[in-house]
Amino acid sequence: MFFNTPKMFEDLISQRLLLRAPRYKDAEDIFEFCGDAGSCKYVDWSPHQSIAESRNFISYLKSRSFRGEGKSYTWFVELMSERKVIATISLVDSDYYGNIATVGYTFSEKYQHRGFATEALLSLMRYLFNVKNFERIEAKVLPENLPSIALLERVGMKREGLLRKGVFCKTCLRDVYIYSILKDEFTRRK
Ligand SMILES: CC(C)(COP(=O)(O)OP(=O)(O)OC[C@H]1O[C@@H](n2cnc3c(N)ncnc32)[C@H](O)[C@@H]1OP(=O)(O)O)[C@@H](O)C(=O)NCCC(=O)NCCS
């Protein structure tokens, strides 16, 4: 078996999107959706209160990637035609000895229902399986988050079960579905 080692992550390009490293000048774009209660409804963090908080968030992401720990990484999703950041997509955790990746994402409400999340997630999955040699990609999702469940099933992930009180979300522990896809399933799917 191929074992991953701690690593840095590259930018990824697909038809309409550039998944790239966070930059300080993205703070306004990030605040536009990370400050919006609608976009943050089902995630484990609270909406940003100011552009300054979005800048701090970027600073945190940059310091984390600078340390090069390789267990987690966030890409900003830039819509190339508008040169605008419309989402974040993350490797929220990874076990690089076991080659398991956990992913998460938040898309601006203004840019939903246009296939951008599908495009970005497929781009990330292709990269993690084909370039970074992960064997399994998983995601956790609250049962009421139907758009996210639809997205995970659209890209070929399977629901494995319900983790009881499996995630701390904002104020309390919540039940959460666990979804996954294996490398050979993803390869066969194409
Ligand atoms: C989860 C989330 C990313 C899903 O976003 P989304 O916009 O529904 O997903 P997509 O961008 O892939 O769009 C899919 C829709 O676009 C349509 N679409 C249009 N053009 C498309 C294209 N080229 N390719 C694929 N789908 C396309 C699809 O038919 C689908 O329509 P539907 O919503 O009517 O079924 C989004 O709801 C979100 O960010 N929510 C807030 C944060 C969150 O909950 N994160 C997840 C925590 S687990």
Image: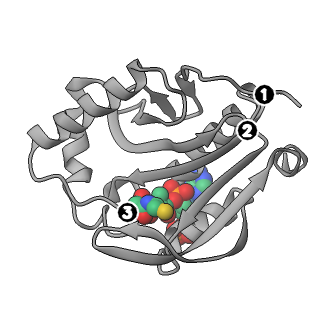
Among numbered discs 2 and 1, the one appearing first in the sequence: 1
Front one among 16 and 186: 186
Could you say where residue 175 lies in the image, as x and y percent from the top left?
51, 79
User: Is 119 positioned to the left or the right of 34 in the image?
Assistant: right
Q: Residue at x 17, y 34 (%)?
A: 55
Q: Amino acid at mark 2?
A: Asn
Q: CA distance from mark 3 to mark 2?
A: 25 Å
User: Is 66 positioned to the left or the right of 176 in the image?
Assistant: left
User: Is 165 positioned to the left or the right of 29 in the image?
Assistant: right
Task: For marks 3 and 1, give the one nearer the viewer.
Answer: 1
User: Is 66 positioned to the left or the right of 70 in the image?
Assistant: left
The answer to whether mark 3 is within 8 Å of ligand 1 is: yes
Q: CA distance from mark 3 to mark 1?
A: 31 Å
**Residue at numbered disc 1:** 3
Could you say where residue 56 lies in the image, as x and y percent from the top left?
18, 35
Q: CA distance from mark 2 to mark 1?
A: 7 Å
Q: Amino acid at mark 1?
A: Phe
Disc 2: CA contacts within 10 A as few (<14), some (14-19) or many (>=20): many
Q: Residue at x 59, y 49 (%)?
A: 102
Which mark identifies residue 99?
2
Task: For marks 3 and 2, give the one nearer the viewer.
Answer: 2
Q: Secondary structure at mark 3?
A: loop
Q: Residue at x 21, y 58 (%)?
A: 47
Instruction: Please say if 60 is above or below 100.
Output: above
Name which quarter of the figure residue 134 lies in: top right
**Residue at numbered disc 3:** 43
Front one among 30 and 65: 65
Instruction: Please say if 163 is above or below 155.
Output: below
